[in-house]
Amino acid sequence: MTTTSTAPGPLFGHLRRLTVGPGLFEHADHADPRPEHGYCVDDVARALVVTSREPDPSAQVQALARTYLDFTLAALRPDGSCHNRMSVDGTWSEPGTGDWWGRAVWGLGVASAHGPTAQFRAEALRGFRLAATARPSPHLRPHTFAALGSFEVGDEHDLLRDAVRAVGVPSPAMADPFWPWPERWLTYANASIAEALLVAGSALGDRAALGHGLRLLDFLVRTETRDGHLSVTPVHGRDRAADEPGFDQQPIEVSTLADACARAYDLTGEERWRTAVGTAWAWFLGKNDSGVPMFDPATGAGYDGLLKDGRNLNQGAESTLAVISTGQQARRLGVWA
């Protein structure tokens, strides 16, 4: 069940400003790109996701998507692993199958399903097939990010099964009702773990995985909601003893929660998940622990962190992509305001 909206969508102006040369600069000093920090697949792959899934992309957005696809493909190595970082002089570094590999698989999967042209989608699919031959690091998030891309391709189920095994699906009798999360701490991009179980459970017909994904997402929404607004896990993490808002809150936590809740709504049709997407978008509008908007409505730039007394004024790629991503889901489900 899907709701659509004809409301105007997110702005890509600041993302264009950060996109210089072959990729997307990771960091910014306020609104100005910081070339000395170079490019990274982590951000470029996220940018590939949002530009590929834009429903009616302008020529400028299509050009951005082309840049991000080319960068991601160039980062791949013959064994399916990929480099994460490239300096402004074109030197690649940090090869492997960590989080960035998982995000590359995710981005290529989305691009292969939703990219703007048949040629674009075919190139993305070839890249996905290559990356899918690698085995991810033993950490949890590479598995979950890769599962999101695998779901989009539709016929690569090994990565989905890997994600289910990596997260684990306890029996209801063995689950901890007070802390069902598969890690001792909530850390970063938390909702992607729940979303990976949702897509794996749906694609594999695994009702246990799907049910556990919904339980984890419900736990996360309850844990990260305070007085009717989101109070997401801060950069230093959160454990079961936390009872006060934490800072600095990262926009990526909000965007991954919006993605997962949108997915849950699509799979179940339950209104509470659509409402949660609206709550995530409201966080960017200023309904948060500090009462400040977390993006620039003139450019679409996202601010890098919610602080106790305001916000981090730097406008880096990750935060800007979080605004765009959450806005896309809010528009699609008709909760954009």
Image (cartoon, rainbow, N blue to C red):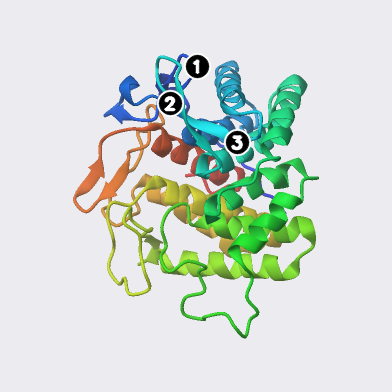
**Residue 50: x, y in percent?**
56, 34
Label 1: state its secondary structure.
loop
Q: In this rendering, does residue 141 appear at all?
A: yes
Q: CA distance from mark 1 to mark 2?
A: 9 Å
Q: Please say whether residue 292 is visible from this viewpoint.
A: no
Question: Crowding at label 1, few (<14), some or many (≥20) Cα neighbours within 10 Å?
Answer: some
305 to 43, vertically: above or below: below
The front one of 295 and 103 is 103
Which residue is found at the position 71% from the left and 40% from the top? 133
Distance from the alpha carbon under mark 1 to that under mark 3: 20 Å
Could you tell me residue 227's position as x and y percent? 35, 67
Residue depicted at 41% across the width and 32% down the height: 317
The residue that label 2 is drawn on is: 39
Q: Position of residue 253 (x, y in %)?
A: 43, 51
Report the front residue among 88 and 136: 136
Q: Nearer the viewer, residue 205 or 129?
A: 129
Tell me which label, 1 or 2, sits earlier in the chain.
Answer: 1
- Dot 3 or dot 2: first in sequence order is 2
Secondary structure type for disc 3: loop
Three-letter amino acid code at disc 1?
Pro
Q: Which labelled disc corresponds to residue 22?
A: 1
Check disc 3 and give the amino acid type. Ser
Q: Which numbered circle lies on residue 81?
A: 3
Query: Which residue is nearer to you in this view: 41 or 335?
Result: 41
Q: CA distance from mark 3 to mark 2?
A: 17 Å
